[in-house]
Image (cartoon, rainbow, N blue to C red):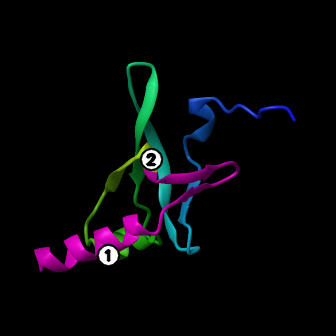
């Protein structure tokens, strides 16, 4: 079985969903340290769960370890959305 590789620039603009199927945003940038991807900057769009949870949010940064799959879309751990909800409620 051949390993399917993806360029980092090919991931920009991909839609990000939680493993529960909730739309979270779009990939804006990869955070690279010592030739390894350590995180992802996700841009909040008006229809994303991220902008609904945290009003006025422009985006979020998640650790690469929370990414479950990368293909035509990104799938991230649902714990990211849960943590954002907790932080959004504490700011009110």
Write down the residue under mark 1: 53
The earlier-in-sequence mark between 2 and 1 is 1
Q: Which residue does the image show at 34% across and 55% down from the upper left?
A: 59
Residue 81 belongs to magenta span: yes
Q: What stretch is highlighted in magenta?
A: 66-92
Q: In screen coordinates, is 16 left or right of 39?
A: right
* Alpha carbon distance from label 2 to label 1: 22 Å
Residue 89: x percent and y percent? Answer: 19, 80
At numbered mark 2, what does the secondary structure look like: helix, strand or loop? helix
Residue 15 position, x and y percent, is 57, 56
The foreground one among 23 and 36 is 36
Q: Dividing the picture into quarters, in which one does residue 73 lie? A: bottom right
Q: Which residue lies furthest to the top in this view?
A: 34
Dot 2 surroundings within 10 Å: few (below 14), some, or many (20 or more)?
A: few
- Quadrant of the image containing the C terminus: bottom left
Q: Residue 65 carries which label?
A: 2
Q: Is residue 39 above or below residue 80?
A: above
Q: Residue at x 42, y 51 (%)?
A: 42
């Amino acid at each position: 079985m051949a390993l399917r590789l993806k360029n980092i620039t090919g991931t920009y603009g991909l839609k990000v969903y939680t493993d529960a199927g909730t739309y979270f945003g779009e990939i804006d940038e990869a955070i690279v340290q010592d030739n390894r991807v350590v995180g992802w900057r996700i841009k909040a769009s008006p229809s994303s769960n991220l902008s609904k949870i945290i009003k006025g949010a422009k985006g979020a940064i998640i650790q690469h370890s929370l990414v479950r799959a990368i293909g035509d879309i990104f799938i991230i751990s649902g714990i990211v959305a849960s943590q954002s909800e907790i932080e959004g409620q504490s700011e009110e």
